[in-house]
Amino acid sequence: MTALDLTRADWRTSTRSSGNGNCVEVATVDGRVAVRDSKDRGGPVLVFPSATWVAFVTGVDAVRPG
């Protein structure tokens, strides 16, 4: 497995997140989506194929109360 270079990643949080720093940050890099904890930016990063991330977000949106 090749390591993904995240040094130039453009990390972002939801516009609905509060300002207290308890957020999940995501970045799109080389056709994959990287996910990390905003409280531990140097910590572990989960990386998913873009299609897997889209399926996850779509599934969450489908069960979220209106």
Image: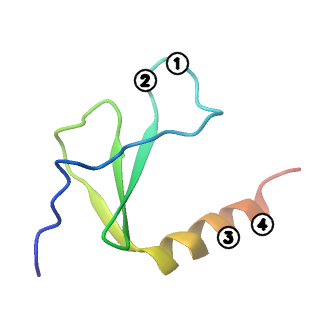
The residue at the point 30 percent across, 61 percent down is 46
In the foreground, 11 or 62: 11
Res 61 quadrant in image: bottom right
Whether pointer 3 and pointer 2 mark residues with C-beta atoms closer than 8 Å, the reply is no
Mark 2 — residue?
Answer: 21
Q: Earlier in the sequence, mark 1 or mark 3?
A: 1
Distance in Å between CA atoms under marks 4 and 1: 26 Å
Residue lying at 20% horizontally and 54% vertically, measured from the top left:
6
Q: Nearer the viewer, mark 1 or mark 3?
A: 1
Q: How packed is label 1: few (under 14 Cα within 10 Å), some, or many (20 or more)?
A: few
Which residue corresponds to mark 3?
A: 59
Disc 1: which residue: 19
Mark 2–mark 4 distance (CA, rounded to whole Å): 26 Å
Label 1: state its secondary structure.
Answer: loop
The residue carrying mark 4 is 62
Residues marked 2 and 1 touching at CB (< 8 Å): yes
- Cβ–Cβ below 8 Å for labels 3 and 4? yes
Going by the numbered disc 1, the residue's amino acid type is Gly
Question: Which is more N-terminal, label 1 or label 4?
Answer: 1
Out of 47 and 32, give the one closest to the viewer: 32
Give the quarter of the figure containing the N terminus. bottom left
